[in-house]
Amino acid sequence: EDQVTQSPEALRLQEGESSSLNCSYTVSGLRGLFWYRQDPGKGPEFLFTLYSAGEEKEKERLKATLTKKESFLHITAPKPEDSATYLCAVNSGGYQKVTFGIGTKLQVIP
Amino acid sequence: GAVVSQHPSWVICKSGTSVKIECRSLDFQATTMFWYRQFPKQSLMLMATSNEGSKATYEQGVEKDKFLINHASLTLSTLTVTSAHPEDSSFYICSANRDQNEKLFFGSGTQLSVL
């Protein structure tokens, strides 16, 4: 059974204080790892897909990296508007089988 | 990017009533849509896979007679929570793939509160 573990569960940063979120996964053949952002009371918003170890993707202040066992979401010089819950998910089988982690709730303080 | 619209955003109902939630793909045809449920401080859990023109596939532990799914067209799937009870109160979210792309696009979610 696929497993996704995210850490920390919650993270509080000062504006401009860079940090990283971790997503550890156990799957039987990774087909894709996804990062999403979710605001309170809203559906997840797609950020990145990573397919193979060594792959990196960037979008504004966010950078996602992937190894064979984990993925990191690096946040550089965050702003208050980056406050949200960041979800990691993996797909290892049929395209409907996507397993989500519990998320990391990020709070960026001005 | 692709847009998935979900309606209503929130609903409050009395115990024993039925509630219908709609999920539409606005700018693409979705052969398959997915329904998730999310309880507070928990991850998204797949409830069922909605297939256009055929019966939905339910995950283990999800009652198909309680959560009725209809996917009558390539742009619309509905989830009906029948005879809702307080324990059904949750955040329900739909999603869809465009073509065979594995990236999921999500609706905005529906917060269901059963009194």
Image: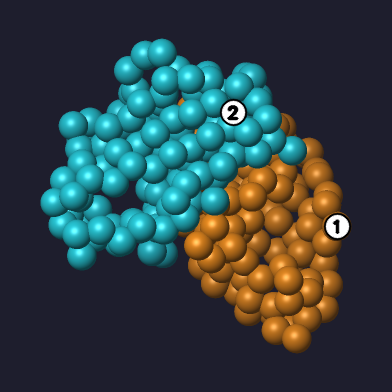
Chain colours: A orange, B cyan
Q: Which residue is mark 1?
A: A60
Q: Quadrant of residue B26?
A: top right
Q: Quadrant of residue B45?
A: top left
> Split into 4 quadrants, where in the image is the N terminus of chain B?
top right
Please give the residue where the numbered disc 2 appears in the rendered image: B97
The percent position of residue B77, horizontal first and vertical second, equals: 44, 30
Q: Pointer 2 indicates a residue of which chain?
A: B
Q: Nearer the viewer, residue A53 or A102?
A: A102
Tag 1's secondary structure?
loop
Q: In the image, what residue occupies the spot 70% across and 64% down?
A: A20
A88 with respect to A99 (left or right): right
Q: Is residue B104 left or right of residue A80?
A: left
Q: Residue at x 42, y 20 (%)?
A: B72
The residue nearer to you, when weighing A59 against B18, is B18
On the image, the x and y values in percent for residue B61 come to 22, 37
Which of the 4 quarters of the picture holds residue B106?
Answer: top right
What is the number of the mark on residue A69? none
Of residues B39 and B73, the one nearer the viewer is B73
Tell me what residue is drawn at x 58 percent, y 32 percent.
B25
- For the residue marked with disc 2, what is the amino acid? Asn
Chain for numbered disc 1: A
Amino acid at dot 1: Glu
Q: Classify residue B100 as left or right of residue A75.
A: left
Q: Is residue B60 above or below residue B54?
A: below
From where the camera sits, is residue A91 visible?
A: no
Mark 1 Cα within 10 Å, few/some/many (few <14, many 20+)? Answer: few
Q: CA distance from mark 2 to mark 1?
A: 25 Å
* Residue that appears at 78% across and 72% down: A78
Q: Is residue A83 visible?
A: yes
Q: Is residue A9 above or below residue B63?
A: below
